[in-house]
Image: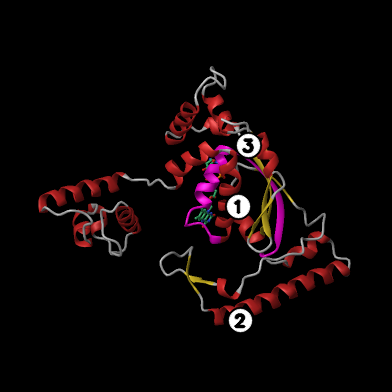
């Protein structure tokens, strides 16, 4: 494994732009893939094993959630992020944070704006999610209203400062689109947890852009073997519950009994579904199971 210091020097202070005025930038990094290996092989020391052995070990550790060796590496970032996104980000309690103070300094004069073609409709199936894009014509009205509102909020803030109002009070009506900046330091284990939640399609699009940038632009080059294992065993892996396994077993048996091959139809799926789901008209767990089976090619697509 190569030492990380050259890669860190290349990346340090490089701003990766996110959204319209946000960024993510590496400030410092302690450790590399070999730090994980070193911690796991506490009695061996580095340099005595072949790369393939190290890779195998890292993959084993990640696969079996042997997590503490991943806590031996740390990353420190400087980020610039809109407040609404930051509210989600800051819920991750396992990082160390120092945020720009709008009590001490004048608020950052930047707000996230939405182009006319980027307004998303409310999802019909997920109360927390977005659906299709709204029509650009409607988007143009929304963007114009956004501009008026942001302008008014910024003017009110400046008026208050000019009138001598304390910065800590003048800020109270600044909108959530206002950008903030923070130093954010986290160990690799908790960073992977953050990335698995926030790169996921269920996370809000905005924070997903940040998480994807951190993952692909910073973690991947600094920890290539960990990144590969993370994708194989976490991000692109699939969790099967006991109920899911039961459905797969019964569906396979159904195929054998009826002499049919996958992908099976929805009638077959409903026949072998978990008995607990059978009486329910709507069942999210059943829908999730269906999606997993479609992904595995066991069910035909477009059934739910
Ligand atoms: C798609 C999505 C939707 C969400 N919706 C909502 C919502 O509607 N409302 C809402 O309030 N939040 C919501 N959240 C936030 C979510 O509940 C978590 O607070 C957030 O994702 C941080 O996760 P975490 O606690 O695992 O991470 P971290 O705080 O980074 O913690 C990492 C891990 O450390 C351990 N840990 C940390 N602190 C403690 C502690 N004090 N006690 C015990 N164990 C601890 C836990 O194992 C935890 O998983 C949502 C998150 C996502 C990804």
- 86 is higher (above) or lower (below) than 189: below
- How many dots with numbers? 3
Residue identified by numbered label 1 = 89
Distance CA(mark 3)–CA(mark 1)? 18 Å
The quarter of the rendered structure image containing the N terminus is: top right
Contact between marks 3 and 1 (CB within 8 A): the answer is no
Question: From which residue to which does the magenta span run?
Answer: 176-205
Residue identified by numbered label 3 = 74
- Residue drawn 60% across the image and 78% down it: 142
**Is 254 on the left-hand or right-hand side of 127?**
left
Q: In the depicted view, which residue is nearer to us: 2 or 183? A: 2
Q: Identify the element where label 3 is drawn.
A: strand
- Residue drawn 43% across the image and 31% down it: 60
Dot placed on the residue nearer the N-terminal end, 2 or 3:
3
Q: Residue furthest top?
A: 43
Crowd tier of the residue under label 1, counting other residues whose Cα lies within 10 Å: few below 14, some 14–19, many 20 or above? some
Q: Position of residue 88 (x, y in %)?
A: 59, 55
């Amino acid at each position: 494994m190569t030492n990380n210091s050259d890669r860190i020097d290349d990346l340090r202070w490089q701003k990766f732009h996110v959204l319209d005025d946000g960024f993510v930038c590496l400030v410092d990094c302690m450790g590399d893939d070999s730090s994980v290996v070193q911690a796991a092989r506490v009695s061996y020391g580095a340099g005595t094993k072949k790369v393939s052995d190290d890779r195998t070990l890292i993959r084993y550790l990640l696969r079996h959630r042997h997590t503490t060796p991943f806590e031996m590496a740390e990353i420190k970032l400087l980020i610039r992020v809109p407040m609404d996104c930051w509210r989600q980000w800051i819920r991750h309690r396992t990082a160390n944070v120092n945020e720009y103070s709008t009590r001490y300094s004048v608020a950052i004069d930047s707000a996230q704006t939405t182009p006319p073609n980027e307004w998303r409709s409310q999802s019909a199936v997920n109360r927390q999610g977005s659906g299709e894009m709204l029509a650009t014509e409607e988007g143009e009205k929304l963007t114009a209203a956004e501009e008026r509102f942001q302008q008014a909020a910024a003017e009110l803030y400046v008026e208050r400062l000019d009138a001598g109002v304390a910065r800590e009070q003048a800020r109270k009506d600044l909108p959530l689109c206002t950008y903030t900046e923070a130093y954010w330091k986290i160990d690799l284990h908790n960073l992977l947890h953050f990335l698995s939640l926030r790169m996921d399609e269920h996370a809000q699009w905005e924070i997903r852009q940040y998480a994807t940038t951190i993952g692909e632009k910073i973690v991947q080059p600094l920890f290539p073997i960990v990144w590969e294992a993370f994708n194989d065993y976490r991000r692109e892996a699939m969790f099967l519950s006991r109920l899911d396994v039961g459905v797969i077993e019964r569906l396979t048996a159904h195929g054998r009994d009826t002499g049919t091959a996958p992908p099976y139809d929805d009638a077959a799926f409903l026949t072998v579904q978990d008995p607990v789901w059978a009486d329910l008209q709507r069942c999210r767990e059943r829908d999730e199971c269906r999606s997993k089976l479609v992904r595995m090619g066991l069910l035909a697509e477009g059934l739910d």
